[in-house]
Image (cartoon, rainbow, N blue to C red):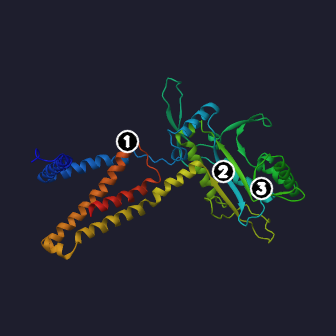
Amino acid sequence: TSLCAAPTDLPHAAMFGESSMVERTAVRLGKFLTQRPITVIMSSLVVCCVLASGLVFRFNMEARSTSLYVPQHSPLAQLRDDMWQTFGVTPDPFIVIVSRSDGGNVISKDILIRALKIHQTIVNTTSAEEIPHFTNPGGSSSPPEPRSGKVHFKDVCLKHFIFELEDYACAVGSVLQLWLYDEANLRSAPAAEVKRVVSDAWANHEIDLGGVEVSDSGEVSAGAIGMMYYLNKRGANYDTGATAGWEEAAWQAVRNTPSRALMPGHRVSAAWSGPDDPRGGQVDLRVTVYSRHINELEAQAFVKEDGHLMGFAVTAVLGYVCLALSLGSKGEIAAGGGTRGLVGRIFLGLSCGVSVGLSLVAGFGLACYLGVPLTPVSPLVVFTLLGVSVDDMI
């Protein structure tokens, strides 16, 4: 028949031959699986467990903004690396914003004193737990040896030389620098002089303020005070995680004070309140803390805190699909042998659900072994893969 076929029928014959080859391969594979069910099932479980172990031994959560939002092999990343190699790595800012909850003026002696107390809380903070950092007591030929110790702000800050002090000091920028962060100097200054000094410094571009308004007399009012604490990215503490530990400890220290610092959008009460409110009451402050590491901690917390909810959602979807596959229609149950057929369909639905769950876990474990980090967006992929898997199951 093939010799007598017309030339136009040859491609169809070739396609038919390929289809037959695929079918024969599928039949052989099916026979192999059905003849050795226990071996195939146990082998699949072992492979899935081995791959899933990557979540235990090679788990890596990537939440750094410099890695997530800039492709590491892009020209932009190369330009950034060249700039850092030439001019040095830019410091990481630890930013604290202080404002009044009623939106009023923060340029007053009382508010500045309370802001200074927040500053003192931050600079006097030590890491909440023992953060390992490394020294090399034996010289360059000896390997680094870990040691534990409390990390202070002076251990992680970027230092620059202050001519007035004739010494190096941590780089901190705020309106409080006008009084050298000395509470005695600020308290001894009259309230009118405090406003005049701030107005002159802002006019000379010596300080930064938020929501500035200038009166006809030149007096400055502002809606927010910013305090910038510059952290050294070149230090050993930055690479070992000690800097991140200090940032979290400083954040918690401000939160645990009566004037707790929460994330943006939260109203907090200030312990260091005074008669600034014209109504005679105490003024509430809104304190906001931001840093790259805190942002990353919040991104990781999304996965940790909501992981049980996502697990419940996945379990509910798989349970519903297994139930739907188990029940089927009345005709299918009757055709399958009544109760025996129903039990068989129940085990079929459960096996499909287990197979989907194992495939998802094995896939993430394999990604960890291949060095692909998981990001805060990775859990959302589960529902996409689950939808495709459910379609295949049905």
Label ID, residue 95: 2
Q: Quadrant of residue 236?
A: top right
Disc 3 on helix, strand or loop?
Answer: helix
Label ID, residue 388: none
- 69 is higher (above) or lower (below) than 320: above
Whole-Å distance between the Cαs marked 1 and 3?
52 Å
Q: Residues within 10 Å of mark 1 (few under 14, many from 20)?
A: few
Q: Residues within 10 Å of mark 3 (few under 14, many from 20)?
A: many
Task: Tell me the residue that label 1 is attached to.
Answer: 370
Residue ranking furthest to the left: 1
Which comes before the other along the chain, label 1 or label 2? 2
Residue shown at 56% from the left, 48% from the top: 293
Q: Which three-letter amino acid code belongs to the residue tagged 2?
A: Ile
In-image side of 23 versus 163 (left or right): left
Q: Position of residue 59 (x, y in %)?
A: 41, 46
Q: Position of residue 313 (x, y in %)?
A: 38, 65
Q: Position of residue 39 (x, y in %)?
A: 16, 50
Disc 1 on helix, strand or loop?
Answer: loop
Whole-Å distance between the Cαs marked 1 and 2?
36 Å
Which comes before the other along the chain, label 1 or label 3? 3
Q: Which three-letter amino acid code belongs to the residue tagged 1?
A: Leu
In-image side of 49 versus 335 (left or right): right
Task: Tell me the residue that label 3 is attached to.
Answer: 112
Q: Residue 334 versus residue 47: which sits nearer the camera?
A: 334
In-image side of 298 versus 331 (left or right): right
Is the residue under label 3 in contact with that under label 1 (CB below 8 Å)?
no
Foreground tag (2 vs 3): 2
Disc 2 on helix, strand or loop?
Answer: strand
In-image side of 371 versus 12 (left or right): right
